[in-house]
Image: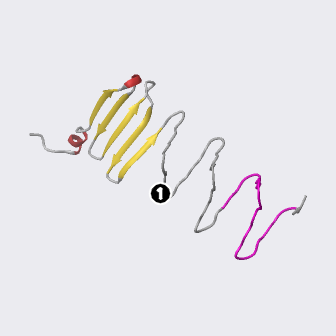
């Protein structure tokens, strides 16, 4: 019997493959530190990767378009959440929309536009309201 060494343990890595519909392939890779489940597209890219580590799973979806749809709620909870788009980002709601933070909400852009199509625009502060600009125009 061969004694266990670091190189022997590394050789215990296994890969299983299974053909799927549409020329896709399911790959399951296992080694001593992690398990990886991948769906490989016909052109060779991974559209779904699930990396299972001692710290927990990491899920990665890759595709031309992705959609998540639910009849009920969808929630995200994390230490930090980051969204980035290379073009336009749109957030819409058929009813109310609210942003809440225990700290500061910081909004930066080359230009801002606020439009109330029906009703007032209300600004409320517990302290001063400060407007800084080259010119401040009212009722123009």
Few, some or many residues within 10 Å of mark 1 (<14, 14–19, 20+): few
Coloring applied to the structure: secondary structure
Q: Which residue is at 65% across, 41% downward? A: 87
Q: Position of residue 24 (x, y in %)?
A: 39, 26
Question: Is 35 part of what is drawn in magenta?
Answer: no
Residue pushed farthest left? Answer: 1
Please state if 33 lies on the left or on the right of 115 as rendered.
left
Quadrant of the image occupied by residue 120: bottom right
Q: Which residue is at 70% across, 76% downward? A: 126
The quadrant the N terminus occupies is top left
Q: Position of residue 17 (x, y in %)?
A: 30, 29
Figure check: 114 above or below 128: above
Residue, disc 1: 77
Q: Which residue is at 60% across, 63% downward? A: 100
Q: Position of residue 4 (x, y in %)?
A: 16, 45
Residue pushed farthest top? Answer: 23
Camera-side residue of 70 and 77: 70
Please state if 106 lies on the left or on the right of 136 as rendered.
left
Figure check: 117 above or below 7: below
Classified by dominant secondary structure, the portion drawn in magenta counts as loop
Question: Is 110 part of what is drawn in magenta?
Answer: yes
Q: Position of residue 102 (x, y in %)?
A: 58, 68
Residue segment shown in magenta:
106-134
Identify the element where label 1 is drawn: loop
Q: Which residue is at 66% across, 61% downward? A: 106
Figure check: 59 above or below 45: below
Please state if 108 lies on the left or on the right of 40 as rendered.
right
Camera-side residue of 126 and 4: 126
């Amino acid at each position: 019997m061969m004694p266990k060494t670091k190189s022997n343990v590394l050789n215990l890595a296994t890969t299983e493959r299974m053909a799927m519909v549409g020329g896709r392939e399911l790959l399951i890779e296992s080694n001593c530190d992690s398990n990886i489940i991948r769906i490989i597209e016909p052109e060779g890219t991974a559209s779904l990767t699930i990396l299972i580590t001692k710290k927990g799973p990491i899920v990665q979806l890759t595709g031309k378009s992705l959609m998540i749809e639910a009849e009920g709620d969808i929630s995200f909870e994390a230490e930090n959440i980051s969204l980035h788009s290379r073009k336009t980002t749109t957030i819409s709601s058929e009813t109310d929309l609210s942003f809440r933070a225990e700290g500061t909400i910081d909004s930066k852009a080359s230009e801002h536009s606020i439009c109330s199509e029906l009703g007032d625009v209300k600004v409320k502060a517990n302290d001063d309201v400060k407007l800084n600009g080259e010119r401040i125009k009212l009722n123009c």
